[in-house]
Amino acid sequence: MNRSSRFAAPFRLGPWTVRPDLNRVSGPDGDVRLEPRVMAVLVRLAADHGQVVGRLDLLDAVWGDAVVGEEILTRAISELRRIFGDSAREPRYIETIINNGYRLVAAVEPVEDEEPSPAPPAVAPPGDGSAPSPPLPSPPVRRAGPRWWAALPVLAAAALVIAFIAGRGARTGDGPAVPGPGARSVPVTAFPGHERQPALAADGRRVAFAWAGPDGSAEGIWIKQDNAEEPLRIGGGPGLASWPAWSPDGQSVAWVQWDGGQAEIRVTSSIGGAARTLATVPGAVVGLDWRPDGRLAFAARDTASGLHRLRVLDPATRAVRELDSDAPAGAGEVQPRLAPDGRRLAWIRLYADGTSSLCVGDADGAHARTVLDGRSGLAGLAWSSDGQRIIAGVDHAGGYGLWAIDPDGSAPPRRLTERSEFAWNPTVATATGALVYEEVRVDQDLWRVRILGRDPWQVETGRLAASSRWEYEAEFSPDGRRLAFVSARSGSPELWVGDADGGALQRLTDTGDAAVSRPRWAPDGSGLAFTIQDWERARVAWVPASGGPIRDLTPPGEWERLVGWWDADGGRLLVEHGRGSDAHLALRPVTGGDLAAAPALPAGLLAWDPSGLCVADGGGIIRWRSGAAEPVVPGLRAVDHDAWRPAGPDILWVMRAGGHAFLMLHAEGRDATATDAIVTDLPGFAGGNLAVAPDGSAVVYPRLGAAEGDLMRLVNP
């Protein structure tokens, strides 16, 4: 048979016949056409059937240098499983190997020689706009005639040529605009302590950063040059130095010096010398960027609202003006970054419920639109050197990593760093495309505080269900005997359940790259509702407490997340349905059915308990009765809206003061008087939620360990 070498040979998977040349599979239910990339994934897995094929290998083989995220591969695998009637939990065709990739477990059988098919018509590249994939080897089947592996040298050579051409096309200046699949991280610094907030000069050869020095006593701004190990301290002083930014000509460095009360924007020569103060602003500054037009963009606290607003500073006149970014009420804005051509500005918008959005507008922040919404955290932005992508530190599925994001939304985000890396605060050299970021090493565990006695308070504190990965968002079951929490111990953040002492652990979910949050026990303890969020949407799901299939409660295509607990009858959940101006509160039935109208609740609701206690974005715990708000705990900050729980007639909550967190007990006496008492301090409290046993005898909270960090460079292989 004289088949074109462009296509892999046909093969069988169980009752299915796979025809790569026709992008078609035929089986018991007839013919099914596959997208070319989906077929290419199947052919690549079949080529090494029985062996694990890494996710990055699949992305590289099928999508080449196209800027895509790992979720596009996840969708391709899901499509294949749907066609074959396969299950991720009990795979008969494709098995997921956590943290590694996939393997084809079904037997691959040859198809007897048949009449050659007519050549298919030329097709446009698939929707990602990339060039067609290089030819892939046929699956290893036994057949007469020439062996399939004989073509491997030719195919490998072709792949190298295609990769070389694509790589040249992706370059800007002396380096790539965005690192491609398989990029590796190499250290730029390896000093003691934590090097923070890097900023690359345009040539990519010098990096400025904040650091406390080798012995931790010289907090300031330092510069390290390529091929030189010793850094140079160029500025600092009393207080905290942060956010270095290079002048467009590379001769000067500006930074923020904060003493705890007000912040100064200072500038000095890149080789050191006397510093000048360009502006003094109240409160902390979050983000500083030296624009191509010579002005400095930054975010400073507005004294009236207490929220950060975008501003621009003219170094020549030292005049400061606020940018008109049309921020919604109650939202702050930080970390402005101007595109290399000076036409577009990107920044992070912070909401009272702790979520973040990535916004893009014109150079002065006008005509803002949301590029990425509803994230649990964004930390650091940089534009690629060609201005076509935004590199951002995104908290996705429980861990910060670097992602390349299309500001126009025409391509899905693509992960740049490995899942195991905790990466944020990227910086890109505008002339070369070099990319440096901050890698942080820190563990987060659950800690339990057992309350042994009162008057005086007696407590016992210790780790609970600890691992070397992150744990957070714990919740006690209604009977207090079990504990649910989110843990990354399996390689990705998933929902786990165990006994109240942290033993007999069982994983309940396998969501891969999706983020799991807000687990909420059913009143009878039979299962848990929780929110799943991927790049496309958020949805509410349900899983039995003993394990079993996950059931989506949110209909396909709709956006929904949990806001509070179950309602009084235990059959419905309070959710926020829709996004933006369409968002509204509603009750989602657990057993199916339409949304129901939510009870009358305060505006800006962040958390809700059916007993009538809730938190709105004005801060503090209130009791909502008959449409009226009664203040209960005014000291709870809005960002800690989930750091409280009822404990019988009392409330346990978290107060922050002087940089420390304290566990507080709010008790109301019979004479309607209320008292708030400090139970104990909560060292390392990481924020988020507070789990409280129903009888108030124990509290579980997330605790951060000591953080260290180095600067890393992401380079193509």
Image (cartoon, helix red, strand yellow):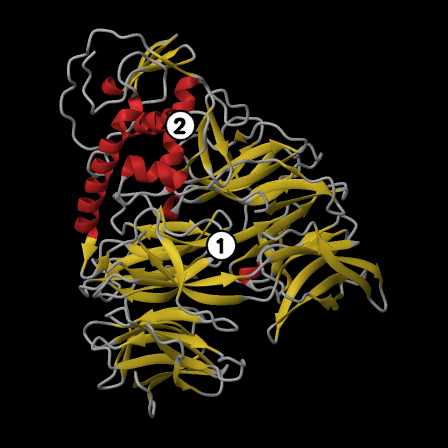
Residue 137 horizontal/vertical position (percent)? 29, 27
Residue 433 horizontal/vertical position (percent)? 25, 61
- The image quadrant where one finds the N terminus is top left
Position of 698 with respect to 374 (left or right) is right
Q: Residues within 10 Å of mark 1 (few under 14, many from 20)?
A: some
Q: In which quarter of the image is residue 144?
A: top left
Task: Write down the residue under mark 2.
Answer: 48
Q: Which residue lies at the image location 27% right of the left edge and 40% below the top edge?
A: 64
Q: Identify which residue, 356 or 143, lies in the foreground.
A: 143
Q: How crowded is mark 2: few (under 14 residues within 10 Å), some or many (20 or more)?
A: some
Q: With respect to residue 261, does 711 lie above or below?
A: above
Residue 664 horizontal/vertical position (percent)? 71, 64
Residue placed furthest toward the bottom: 274
Residue type marked 2:
Asp
Residue 682 horizontal/vertical position (percent)? 68, 65
Position of 483 with respect to 124 (left or right) is right
Position of 94 with respect to 497 (left or right) is left
Q: In which quarter of the image is residue 701?
A: bottom right
Element class at badge 1: loop
Point out the tag, 2 or 1, that comes first from the N-terminus: 2
Asked whether residue 456 appears in the rendered view, the answer is yes
Distance from Cα at disc 2 to Cα at disc 1:
54 Å
Q: Which residue lies at the image location 30% right of the left edge and 85% below the top edge?
A: 271
Q: With respect to residue 635, does 359 lie above or below?
A: above
Residue 429's mark? none
Q: Which residue lies at the image location 39% right of the left edge and 43% below the top edge?
A: 535
Residue type marked 1:
Gly
Q: With respect to residue 249, does 317 lie above or below?
A: below
Mark 2 or 1: the one toward you: 2
Task: Write down the residue under mark 1.
Answer: 604
